[in-house]
Amino acid sequence: MCYTKMEFETVLNGELGEFGKYQLINIILLALPAVASAFMAGDYVFTASKLPYRCTVPLCDEDPTEFAPKWILNAIPRTTTGFEDCSRYANLLNTTTFPSDACPAGLFDRNTIIPCEGYVYGRTNSVVYDFGLECKEWLRALAGTLNSLGAMIALPLAGFVSDYFGRRISIVFFAFNVALIGLLKAFSVNYTMYVTLQFMHTAIGGGLYSAAYILATELVGPKFRVPTSAAMSSCFALGQALLGAIASAVHEWRKLTLTLFIPVFSILSYYWIVTESHRWLLSKNKNDKARSTLENAARLNGRKISDNTMSFLLTAIPRQRNEKTDMSRRLLIIQVIKSPVMLRRCCTTPVYWIATTFIYYGLSINSVSLSGNMYLNYILTSLIEIPGYWTAYKALDKVGRKATLFSGYMLCSVCCIAFSFTPKSMYALSLILYLTGKFSTGVIFTSLYLFTSELYPTRHRHSFLGFSSMLGRIGSVVSPLTPPLMVYWSGIPSMLFATMAALAGLLILTQPETRGRKIPDTFEDAEQLGLT
């Protein structure tokens, strides 16, 4: 049989199998990097969490101090959620004697409020207590901001390492960085060291998830790319839920950090355990390694690749590149600039990512209203994403990538608008709208990773995905700034999320549909998407 005129994708999937034991084993192994990535992305939520504290009241506090005694509102101003953190009423009488069973309001000047001279804590298990961050919310929030800024640097680095050294090397490299920086962070001696390591953690470790995701989707055939994408996203969400569960059991932030990141060193063994992407090997013309990988994959799947077929697979992608050598020699950025199709694509895909991360992290930041227990709250908001991922799995192949993304963005927009105008007294309705909005982010994230990766060629896929995802981190950097806007109107953050969702949904309509099409292997293939 002659294979020279057959499609590379058809031959590869026909001979190797789109999904079998080979793909299953490796995807199960890739679940661990996804979980570790979730730890890295969310550990600061607990290690740098806001603590319940109040001013000390020297006239009334006794040893041992009680955080919320019955007399607390006599000495500290009331708020809608309890009492003030950082101020108290000034002493009215210069006395140290009062009835032993009470702290009467008459001891204080309720017209004069003064800042705290000391603090009484409800709990002491975050960096706020160790490093004296009481009443410095902007400084405490810096940990989350630097986490996102570091991720912006990580993604182009991940693209370079993955596209030039391979997916497997990329996973091992970033896993080592995640484990090492996590270990060092547990021994921070001050807040400057902590936030610096928080930045470095994502800056040189943040490419772990994208590397694992790219490898997983490149191992399977077109029919299984969507469920594989949903499975990887679900592993990340489960990692977030597991983080919340571990944090509920290991309260002290240093011990929690060690518990989370020491096991990540085990991923170093993946250099010998996990396979390299046969697509990447073929695109880099590494024929000997590609042959060995394909033969091993076929053996695990109970198949055998003929010599004639192997010869075609080892030369198909290089031959496609060599047919247009002039184009292949140009720098990637010049190719993009000179291609109106790719330039437009590179300008619009980052907008999707900015909107999505802005909405996703913004909803997460405001999720404290779901429950009084921060650990349960975090677990619930993580798990609600999983139904969204699998809804995307069902919808992406049935209605297409564009329709799924458009519907997800518009559903999120409608829920956020409705949530903005729902009275707080209607708790059940508010909860349903909130969870539905968070659910839609699960649909969007799974679809967006897959859609973006399918729009770009194999040789530069990780670089393009990293570029879009890197700029998308602007959304996660800005989202922590939305809660202060509630001072003017409680619905402002939700209206901002709704606006961004609607904008992204409309821009989705400008891109080609990729459902049922083969993954573009060359720059020219990517240009032809939507034209043929």
Image: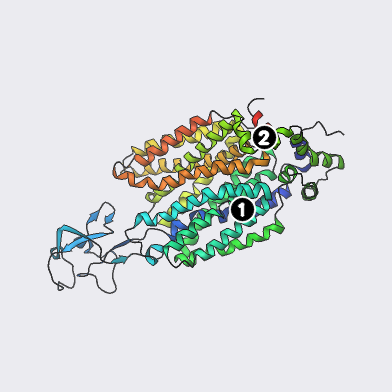
88 to the left or right of 344: left
Q: Quadrant of the N terminus?
A: top right
502 to the left or right of 105: right
Label 1 vs 2, first from the N-terminus: 1
Is residue 139 in view? yes
Q: Residue at x 64, y 50 (%)?
A: 161
Residue type, numbered disc 2: Phe
141 to the left or right of 239: left
Q: Quadrant of the C terminus?
A: top right
Residue type, numbered disc 1: Ala
Density class for disc 1 (Cα within 10 Å; few <14, some 14-19, many ≥20) is many
Between 290 and 295, the residue placed more toward the observer is 290
Between 248 and 83, the residue placed more toward the observer is 83
Most distant residue in the top direction: 532
- Assess whether mark 2 and mark 1 are in contact (beta carbons under 8 angstroms): no
Q: Residue at x 27, y 74 (%)?
A: 63
Q: Which residue is mark 1?
A: 31
Q: Residue at x 72, y 33 (%)?
A: 326
Query: Which color scheme did the rendering employ for the protein?
Result: rainbow
Residue 395: image x %, image y %? 57, 35
Residue 204: image x %, image y %? 56, 55
Which dot, 1 or 2, sits closer to the camera? 2
Q: Which residue is mark 2?
A: 523
> Element at badge 1?
helix
From mark 1 to mark 2, how far is it between C-alphas?
Answer: 30 Å
